Image (cartoon, rainbow, N blue to C red):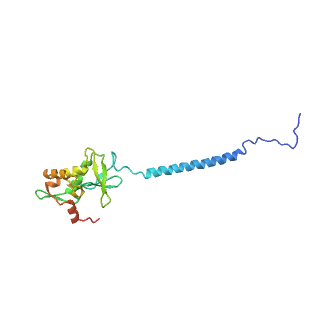
Amino acid sequence: MARKPSGQSRRTPTTGTRSQPLSKALANSLGKVVALVLVLGLVLLINHYCSFQPEPFGPDAHIVSIDGDSLRAANGAAYRLFGIDAPELKQTCEEANGKTWLCGRAAKAKLTTLMKGGNVTCEEKDKDRYGRVVAVCSAEGIPDLGEAMVLAGYAIDLPSQGSPYAQAETEARQGKRGIWRGTFEEPAKWRQAHPRTD
């Protein structure tokens, strides 16, 4: 029977003892990189969805009439219809028999009705002094909302913008439509006599 020399102790294999600390360090570093990538991805997602602005126009856009010649998109942007001027909201007009009626409210209601089909789109022409976009706008089945408003007699043509709807105004006047069925003050003159206080 062979004896082990005294003084020699039993040794355990050392494979992996040096690589264990190296593996832990690598795993920690890799974990930090993954965590950083996840946080960065989360920040980008939050930024994208929290700063998302819906398209102001299109099939699903929410557009409202402010008055007879102005619109407001869902994003808060205001648009003025090119080439027309409609009675102001508080403006009244007179029927042929002298009876007053709320022509400003009626103009807003007419524009709302014209936009009812949805799919409102606008093509910018200019900006007015209030910073609103001046645009030619259309809605489902209505190629030009400005022209439709003038033709229905709820707005007048603007010579200062090249009289784009002079023919439509002549037809409305001859047909005694809307404000042409009696008398009215031109919206610009009415605004001068009734300046806004807000």
Q: Residue furthest left?
A: 97
- Seen in the image, is 42 located left or right of residue 25? left
Residue 56 appears left or right of 49: left
Q: Residue 119: give x, y in percent of width and height.
A: 30, 46
Tell me residue 98's x, y (percent): 11, 59
Residue 188 in view here: yes
- Quarter of the image with the C terminus is bottom left
At which x and y percent is residue 4?
Answer: 87, 38
Location of residue 100 (image quadrant): bottom left
**What residue occupies the far front of the structure in this picture?**
162
- Depth check: give the residue in front, 6 or 73: 73
Residue drawn at (24%, 56%) of the image: 161
- The answer, for residue 152, to whether it is visible in the render is no
146 sits to left or right of 61? left
User: Residue 89 location in percent, x, y?
Assistant: 23, 58
| Quadrant in which the N terminus appears | top right
| Quadrant housing residue 15 | top right
Q: Classify 124 as above or below 194.
A: above
